[in-house]
Amino acid sequence: MSQAPTARKTIETLLQEHRHFQPPASFAAQANARDPSIYERADQDHEAWWASWAEKLHWDRKWDQVLHWDLPFARWFVGGKLNASVQCLDRHVQAGLGTRVAFHWEGEPGDARTLTYAHMLEGACRVANGLRALGIRKGDRVTLYMPMVPELAMAMHGCARIGAIFSVVFAGFSATSLKDRIQDQQARLVLCADGCWRRGKLLDLKTVVDEAVAECPSVERVVVWRRGAGAATASRKQARDLEWSAAFDHQPATCAPESMDAEDPLYILYTSGTTGKPKGILHTTGGYLTAAYATSNLVFDLKPETDVFWCTADIGWVTGHSYVVFGPMANGVTQVMYEGAPNHPNPDRFWELVARHKVSIFYTAPTAIRAFMKWGDEWPAKHDLSSLRLLGTVGEPINPEAWVWYLHHIGRERCPIVDTWWQTETGSILITPLPGITRTLPGSATRPFPGVGAALVDEQGNEVQGAGGGYLVLTRPWPSMLRGIWGDNERYHKTYWSRFPGRYFAGDGCKRDEEGNYWLLGRVDDVMNVAGHRLSTMEIESALVDHPAVAEAAVVGVPHDLKGQTPVGFVLLRAGHQPTPTLAQDLIEHVAKLIGGLARPERVIFAAELPKTRSGKIMRRLLRDVAEGKALGDTTTLADPKVVEELKQMYEEKES
Ligand code: ATP
Ligand code: MG
């Protein structure tokens, strides 16, 4: 009989990171989460843990059962009734906090508005009444195609108030992408803005909507909010169009909320499309709000009386849903909302806003942090950032060097950093430090949030014990988990529950160190096979970003005759560095020194930009297509199609 094959490592992990940071004592002393025993408590009875958070919300009727789990279908707070907009608006106004600022809003041209919780409640009620007047009922779908303006948050709460299922489409998507999403949902109504400002230009959103809706017979009406502030767009009024002011402004400022079942749908939201065609993720009401509320409270340590929270994510992504519109508002905190680009008119626009509004908690993405690094240290240095007390990051693995840059140049060594891992599907943060408890390490999201069950498994689904690398799976249901893919139960089952039966497959590679910290290693699809070794592209990228000349890197495995695959690095330099053959060689050696010859890139290509999704994530699958000379896969979620075309040309010139 032949011997069993020696176990092949699912992912080998080579990059070592030993820096670590304790929560500052003054932070730990005041933190919402101070007692490390909450992990144990939540673990012993996760239903009781989540129920203790649900109890902090306002329920019209309490649930009969915390969790009904019929794998892969979860129902949380079964029999409970509540309304999402009530948690985020009425509760605060009724508690006498109507005059608290909900949003300090700033438009890109510099126009500003201040909206209190009372304003937001009134606005949401007018929208809700207006929607009812237009015949929209509980369960109808409403598509929102709007920029970062308070009216978008009002519209979401307005829909939630009457039980209409809303779906926000990022207002940078093309007419085709918008059309696909409207058709997928069979929306009856579209709420849009006529335009928005981006890098000094007024983008014409209404023309995009007109083009999309022309092929969407389900849409009865389009309600248009006027951005104003200068120019008007070229779009023409269509027969089905209604002005926002006519549809909503004259409606009554109060509206009785629909009492929703905990499991009634709240929204549909499409994933970013980093790995392929976006999936329409369905979220429901009670569990989602509970987890968004709890994680906002503990991970961001919100103190609603004093904090000013700024999550820079667009509301068009899940981060903006859970950590602008629902989690922070359920906590009643004051927020900053900004319409435009971070580098308009100068690369210090964010820091100027932080200083002016005394932002205390700042949450952004690695792509933004790497852009700040690229633009130069002098921009944040010009501003008083002493109001900041906590920083966060989400969206991609953060390269340790970017983490340390963030701590030094933005956090000024004073602010803890929470690196939060989660997905559109998970609805809320699942792997994260708790800033008053957790010892953080640059590049690690540390450990599962209390009550969350995570594990690593190998190809065969065997659980990896202790330190090691593998595929991240979730082992227990959690309240804000997706309830399905809109209209596609089969894809739901296939994508998340078939690879490792009984467990949720996240699609991300991950390693765990001896202390139990989780280090996300990027997509399973981005793992490459070099001479029989399974390497994470992310670790090689982090080794490149560790070099002082590099701001950002994307590594892909390209076919190789002998080794099977070999790494090739696409690199963006920091301001002040020139692309030369000597530097390229330097970078190759730097990787070999940090993680070993196995990971040595075959080539380094200096790029002006990397192909990214509209949410700012690097799309390695397209770089792989370029390197393999294949036709490009789905490019509809690409932020700028020119970037990949240019890289393709560069790559092919160098090849010949
Ligand atoms: P698609 O599913 O359509 O390919 P997407 O996965 O990029 O798109 P999102 O739901 O926006 O869509 O992103 C979730 C993914 O982002 C995670 O699966 C993970 O790969 C990555 N991610 C998010 N936060 C972190 C983090 N803190 N560390 C590492 N990776 C992260
Ligand atoms: Mg995904």
Image (spheres, grey):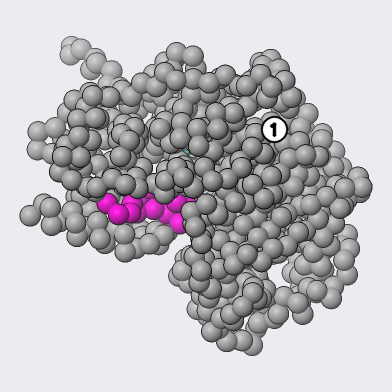
Q: Main structural element of the magenta stretch: helix, strand or loop? A: loop
Examine the structure image and report whether residue 620 is included in the region drawn in magenta: yes
Residue in front for this viewpoint, 603 or 153? 603
Residue in front for this viewpoint, 7 or 508? 508
* Spot occupied by residue 391 in the image (x, y as percentages of width and height): 58, 36
- The residue labelled by disc 1 is 301
User: How many C-alpha atoms fall within 10 Å of the one at disc 1: few (<14), some, or many (≥20)?
Assistant: many
Locate residue 200 relative to residue 230 in the image: left or right: left
438 versus 98 height, above or below: above
Q: Quadrant of residue 22?
A: top right
656 versus 125 height, above or below: above
Q: Quadrant of residue 7?
A: top left
Q: Which residue occupies 76% across, 52% down? A: 102
Note whether residue 264 is visible: yes
140 versus 431 height, above or below: below
Locate residue 372 relative to residue 83 in the image: left or right: left
Q: Which quadrant is home to the C terminus? A: bottom left
Q: Which residue occupies 45% across, 42% down? A: 377
Examine the structure image and report whether residue 125 is included in the region drawn in magenta: no
Q: At label 1, which amino acid type do we have?
A: Asp
Q: Secondary structure at mark 1?
A: loop
Residue in front for this viewpoint, 597 or 136? 597
Q: Residues in magenta?
A: 607-621
Q: Which residue occupies 53% across, 21% down? A: 21
* Spot occupied by residue 287 in the image (x, y as percentages of width and height): 70, 40
